[in-house]
Every structure is written in structure tokens, then in C-alpha cells.
Image (tube, rainbow, N blue to C red):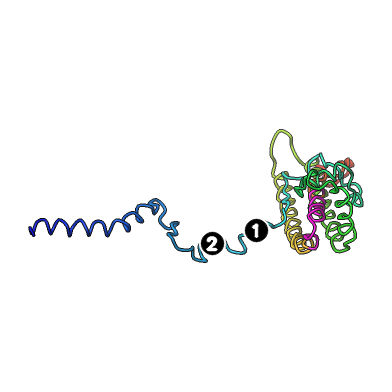
Amino acid sequence: MDSKFLLAVLLSGAVLAGAPYASAQALAPTQNPEHYLGPFPPSPDALPSGSQLANNHKPHVKVYTNDNLPGAAGGDFDGTDFSAINDCDRNCFEQVRQLAHVSPASNPEWKRDLLRALDPVRKDSEWQQFLRDLYDHHQGFCQIGEEKREELARVADPQNVTARELNVDDKYDARFKQAQASLAGLYLRQRPLQQRFAYNTFSYQFSQLQVSRIQNAPCPAQRYTAASPDDPDDP
């Protein structure tokens, strides 16, 4: 056999044998090779951790600041009567149904199911105490904001920013931070208490709606106290 022909055959065989490896390399992404997992299952380090998955189900935490006080619209719960937090009219029924993703066509008895699901939430004393504490914290933020507005009304110059005005800002920024830290501690109680209602999507979503009602309730009407002529704080 011609030696040149034999050499050509051997070389072509080597190329064909290496083709699968070359194809596999071509499939791997070149821009982000660290993300390529190949044909093998990803390592545990490449998967989301349990804490990352749990973060998707953490309760929504309301953060209050000087510029983020509750607005003027409170929906079904206006914040003036805490006992109304357990009310649920037809509009509330529809809200809970939508939150629970229940189709009336698939469950014609959904209203009766929801009605029965309200009692466990209303009768859970620890959950009710959590709502009460959350409500009191909400009112506390409103009070801080009102006191700041009253103090600024006494010392602020509408034409110029003054040192006294900035001192008021600093004073109430510190109070807001302290109140927010207390609120963060309160939210740690929310999830374990809400898990009691997780067996029933209507119960759970009603409890979530209650928290949202408190978070979005408007502050009471502002009250401004007129400073007396001999008020030592009067500029």
C-alpha cells in the first residue's frame, strides 16, 4: 500500500475520532463559561439555597421614612377603628378570591368556603395581637410625622432653609430610625403566625389583606396647635 495513502487514512481517522469532543466544546458558551453545566447535573453550590427560596415567600415589610408616610387613601380600612380590621364585605370577598387565584367557575361554592375561612383568622388571639401591635406602630409613625410638621411650622422660614429647620430634620430622622427598628422586630413575628393559616388559601390571603390594610391606612387628620405668644419655642 502506498505510504502516502496510508498516512492520509490514519489522519482522517484521528480527525473523525476527535469530532464529538470538538462539537461538545462548540456547544459550551464562551462568554460565560462558568455558567455552563455540561451534560452533568449541577453541583449543589450552583443551585439556589434554601434561604434564597424562602426569601420569595417572606412577608412584605413596610418601610416608613420622613418622605414615605401613609397616604390619604386607605381603602376599606380607614384606620380610625381597629376592630374594623376583621370586617370583610363583598368587595373584600372579591379581593381575597383574586389573591387566592380561585376561579368561580371551578368552585361555585367559593363564597361559602371563604366565609368559613374567616373565622380561624378572626379567632386567633396571637394573630389579632400582632395586628394590634402593627396598628399601634402605624399610628406611632403618624404621630411622629405630625409632631415634625407642627415643629417645622413654628421654626421654618418659607424663604430660606435655616439651621433650626435642619435640627428638626435631624431630630425626627433619628426618631424615625428608632421606630423603624422596632417595626422590623415586630415583622419577625408575622411569618410564623401566618403559617397557621397556610392550610387554607382563603384564610392565608385574608390575613395578608389585613396586614396590607394597616400598612396603607391613612393617618388621622392633622392637628396643628397654635403657639401661644409666650411659647419659648416660638422664634
Crowding near pointer 2: few (<14 within 10 Å), some, many (20+)?
Answer: few
Image: magenta residue range: 196-213
Residue 162 coordinates in the image, percent (x, y)? 70, 41
Q: Is residue 110 left or right of residue 56?
A: right
Q: Residue at x 14, y 56 (%)?
A: 8
Q: Number of numbered discs present? A: 2
Q: Which residue is mark 2?
A: 47
Q: CA distance from mark 1 to mark 2?
A: 15 Å
Which residue extends farthest bottom? 44
Q: Secondary structure at mark 2?
A: loop
Q: Which residue is mark 1?
A: 55
- Front residue of this view, candidates 148 and 17: 17
In the image, which is nearer the foreground, mark 1 or mark 2? 2
In the figure, residue 15 lies in which quadrant? bottom left
Dominant secondary structure, magenta:
helix
> Does the magenta portion include 57?
no
Mark earlier in primary sequence (1, 2): 2
Q: Position of residue 142 (x, y in %)?
A: 81, 48
The picture places residue 200, in percent across and down from the top left corner, at 80, 57
Viewed as shown, does residue 39 lie left or right of 189? left
**For residue 28, what is the image quadrant?**
bottom left
Q: Position of residue 12 (x, y in %)?
A: 20, 56
Q: Quadrant of residue 120?
A: bottom right
Does 203 lie within the magenta span?
Answer: yes
Q: Quadrant of the N terminus?
A: bottom left
Q: Which mark is residue 20?
A: none
Mark 2 residue type: Leu
Does dot 1 land on a helix, a strand or a loop? Answer: helix
Q: Residues within 10 Å of mark 1 (few under 14, many from 20)?
A: few
